[in-house]
Image: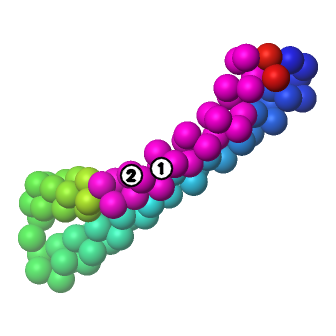
């Protein structure tokens, strides 16, 4: 394998990781902004109030988007990684 193929596979893998992490990070951002706004409006400064909604929203989004993530990873491995391993 030459350097161009290696760097192209790495670029595609990094882009796939960005694509797969976007829904989780978006859910954490939305939950954080919502809880932060709630805390600013009510002057409630509880640490678990920021942590628990973020974790719950990320778990729900992960559960909903798990089939998309699995499909994207399987497609990437079948199209890019496995042919390199078997010498194609």
Residue beneath the point at 40% across and 58% down? 65
Helix, strand or loop: magenta stretch: helix
Q: Does 73 appear in magenta?
A: yes
Q: Position of residue 50 (x, y in %)?
A: 19, 60
Compared across the picture, whether 31 is left or right of 66 comes to left
Indicate the quadrant where residue 78 lies. top right
Compared across the picture, whether 87 is left or right of 79 comes to right
Q: Which of the pair 55/74 is nearer the observer?
A: 74
Residue, disc 1 = 69
Badges 2 and 1: C-beta atoms under 8 Å apart? yes
Residue beneath the point at 47% across and 55% down? 68
For the residue labelled by badge 1, is the local secondary structure a helix, a strand or a loop? helix
| Residue 86 seen anywhere in this rendered image of the structure | yes
Please rate how many residues cluster around mark 2, counting C-alpha atoms within 10 Å: few if below 14, some from 14 to 19, many from 20: few
Q: Position of residue 42 (x, y in %)?
A: 11, 80
Disc 2 versus disc 1: distance between alpha carbons? Answer: 5 Å
Residue, disc 2 = 66
Q: Which of the pair 36/54 is nearer the observer?
A: 54
Indicate the quadrant where residue 48 lies. bottom left
Provide the residue span drawn in magenta. 61-86
Indicate the quadrant where residue 12 lies. top right
Name the image quarter holding the C terminus: top right
């Amino acid at each position: 394998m030459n350097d161009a193929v290696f760097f192209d596979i790495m670029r595609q893998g990094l882009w796939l990781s960005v694509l797969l992490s976007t829904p989780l990070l978006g859910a954490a951002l939305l939950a954080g902004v919502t809880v932060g706004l709630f805390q600013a409006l009510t002057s409630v400064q509880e640490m678990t109030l920021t942590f628990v909604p973020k974790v719950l929203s990320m778990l729900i989004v992960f559960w909903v988007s798990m089939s998309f993530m699995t499909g994207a990873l399987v497609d990437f491995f079948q199209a890019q990684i496995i042919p390199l391993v078997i010498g194609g």
